[in-house]
């Protein structure tokens, strides 16, 4: 599942999205609304470092369930619980606890687990490589680079949690197979948004 074409295309798509979306957002925040220089420990630097894993873990896999029926042709398939049981202690969202049926909780835990490694690394990088003082464009491009680097582990873990048997069945259960492609797309997007809760 992790090396399927669907998974790899999702990682690539999310990396591109994690470059374009934050570039616009960070430009507006740090280039228009406020301007540098920024100290490495300023709220403008610390805030994106702390918040990005959670925003990325929510946005990266948000609409992935919409393509599950077509993803099987690209090698994506449900994963039986027996295959993930030994990893469920390290990654609890791979288990069957009733809380994990809500994608928002699974994805926030993915963000929290990725942030354990991402936060200290990003803070040290901001202090010793980019800083101690960051110019406006260093702040913007550093934040974009950070978001792009967060996309692969978050996408892989979130989609792996989606592939686990009970989560996969719930996601596929409500997908529309309407003959009209436009209506099918809108109904599937709506279902993805319902899966959050």
Image: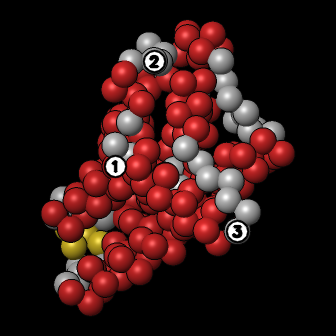
Q: 57 or 43: nearer the eye?
A: 57
Residue at x-position 42% and y-position 21%: 92
Question: Marks 2 and 3: which is nearer the front?
Answer: 3
Q: CA distance from mark 1 to mark 3?
A: 35 Å
- Which badge, 1 or 3, comes first in the chain's sequence? 1
Residue 180 - label? 3
Q: CA distance from mark 2 to mark 1?
A: 22 Å
Q: 50 or 132: nearer the eye?
A: 50
Question: Marks 2 and 1: which is nearer the front?
Answer: 2
Quarter location, residue 76: top right
Residue 96 - label? 2
**Seen in the image, is 128 located left or right of residue 59?**
left
For the N terminus, the image quarter is top right
**Seen in the image, is 52 located left or right of residue 1?**
left
Q: 180 or 3: nearer the eye?
A: 180
Label 2: how many residues lie within 10 Å, few (<14), some (14-19) or many (20+)? some
Image location (x, y in percent) of residue 68: 67, 46
Instruction: Residue 188: tell me if it is visible.
Output: yes
Image location (x, y in percent) of residue 53: 37, 49
Question: Marks 1 and 3: which is nearer the front?
Answer: 3
Residue 54 - label? 1
For the C terminus, the image quarter is top left
Label 3: how many residues lie within 10 Å, few (<14), some (14-19) or many (20+)? few
Instruction: Residue 151: tell me if it is visible.
Output: no
Q: In the picture shown, does residue 2 fall above or below 5?
A: above
Residue furthest out toward the bottom: 32
Image location (x, y in percent) of residue 78: 68, 29
Q: 95 or 34: nearer the eye?
A: 95
Image location (x, y in percent) of residue 178: 67, 59
Label 1: how many residues lie within 10 Å, few (<14), some (14-19) or many (20+)? many
């Amino acid at each position: 599942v992790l090396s399927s074409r669907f998974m790899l295309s999702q990682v690539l798509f999310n990396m591109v999205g994690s470059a374009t979306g934050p570039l616009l957002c960070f430009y507006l925040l740090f280039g228009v609304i406020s301007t540098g220089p920024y100290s490495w420990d300023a709220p403008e630097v610390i805030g994106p470092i702390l918040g990005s894993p959670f925003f990325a873990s929510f946005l990266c896999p948000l609409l992935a369930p919409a393509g599950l029926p077509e993803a099987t042709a690209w090698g994506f398939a449900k994963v039986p619980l027996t295959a993930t049981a030994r990893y469920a202690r390290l990654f609890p969202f791979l288990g069957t606890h009733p809380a994990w049926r809500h994608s928002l909780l699974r994805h926030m835990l993915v963000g929290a687990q990725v942030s354990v490694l991402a936060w200290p690394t990003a803070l040290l990088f901001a202090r010793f490589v980019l800083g101690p003082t960051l110019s406006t464009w260093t702040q913007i491009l550093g934040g974009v680079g950070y978001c792009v680097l967060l996309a692969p582990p978050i996408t892989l873990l979130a989609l792996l949690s989606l592939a686990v048997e009970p989560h996969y069945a719930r996601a596929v259960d409500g997908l529309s197979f309407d003959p009209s492609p436009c209506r099918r797309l809108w109904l599937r997007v709506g279902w993805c948004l319902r899966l959050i809760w």
